[in-house]
Image (cartoon, coloured by chain):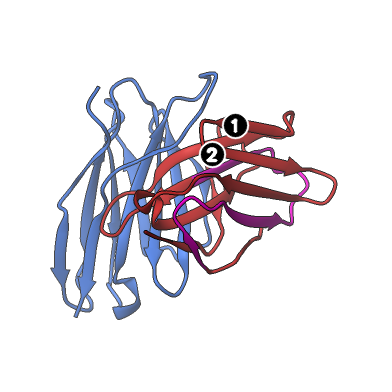
Chain colours: A red, B blue
Amino acid sequence: GENVEQHPSTLSVQEGDSAVIKCTYSDSASNYFPWYKQELGKRPQLIIDIRSNVGEKKDQRIAVTLNKTAKHFSLHITETQPEDSAVYFCAASYETSGSRLTFGEGTQLTVNP
Amino acid sequence: KAGVTQTPRYLIKTRGQQVTLSCSPISGHRSVSWYQQTPGQGLQFLFEYFSETQRNKGNFPGRFSGRQFSNSRSEMNVSTLELGDSALYLCASSLPGAIQETQYFGPGTRLLVL
């Protein structure tokens, strides 16, 4: 089955700096790669996603890049703010429905004011 | 639109008991997936239901089961509870066939097994 590895497990940055989280996946059939943000005690919330026919996608301060050849994808957050502090999860799915997500272990991002 | 809702939010059970959790998807969503979240194992896929049929299944023992009703609401059942079943159980709904088949998560049911 699919296996997703996520690095780093913890990331601390100063407000205004950029943050990068990287994930690798094992199954070349995976074609959908969402990123979720989970604040303490809350539900995971989708922040951005990308499909395998696209190499990069951006939404304001957040961007995701995908390298299908190397089987890795990355989340980039620019101009970080304290409210960006949370656990971020990457995931991959080979189902056309986008279900059956395989998640990475998560990255605890702390943005220091 | 109202988001995904789950009941109950918190539950305490003892070993050997069984438990049923409920999930109501976003109106119009027909797919419901269930995930288990623990500190040690992270987020793991349990199963997915679509049109009252189990469409996908993760690597969990048969003690974990689910079903979906005609209104797309879903329930999952765990029989013969073990201490290791203590976790946050999340369901997610999506609209298969939509341009963006995004999974939207509910707030979860936190289960504690004593």
Q: Nearer the viewer, residue B44 or B69?
A: B44
In the rendered image, the vertical position of residue B27 relative to residue B36, given as above or below:
above
Q: Residue at x 23, y 65 (%)?
A: B111
Question: Percent from the top left, x then y, of residue A9?
Answer: 54, 69
Q: Which residue is mark 2?
A: A62
Say whether residue A18 is visible.
Answer: yes
Q: Nearer the viewer, residue A57 or B95?
A: A57
Q: Amino acid at mark 1?
A: Lys
Q: Chain of mark 1?
A: A
Question: Which portion, as a residue range, is magenta?
Answer: A11-35
Question: Do labels 2 and 1 touch, CB within 8 Å?
Answer: yes
Q: Quadrant of the N terminus of chain A?
A: bottom right
Q: Quadrant of the C terminus of chain A?
A: bottom left
Q: Which residue is mark 1?
A: A58
Q: Chain of mark 2?
A: A
Say whether residue A96 is visible.
Answer: no
Q: Residue at x 61, y 44 (%)?
A: A93
Q: Residue at x 60, y 56 (%)?
A: A21
Question: Percent from the top left, x then y, of residue A98?
Answer: 56, 36
Question: Percent from the top left, x then y, of residue A15?
Answer: 44, 54
Q: Amino acid at mark 2?
A: Ile
Real-space Cα distance between discs 2 and 1? Answer: 6 Å
Asked whether A30 falls inside the magenta stretch, the response is yes
Q: Residue at x 38, y 48 (%)?
A: A44
Q: Main secondary structure of the magenta part?
A: strand
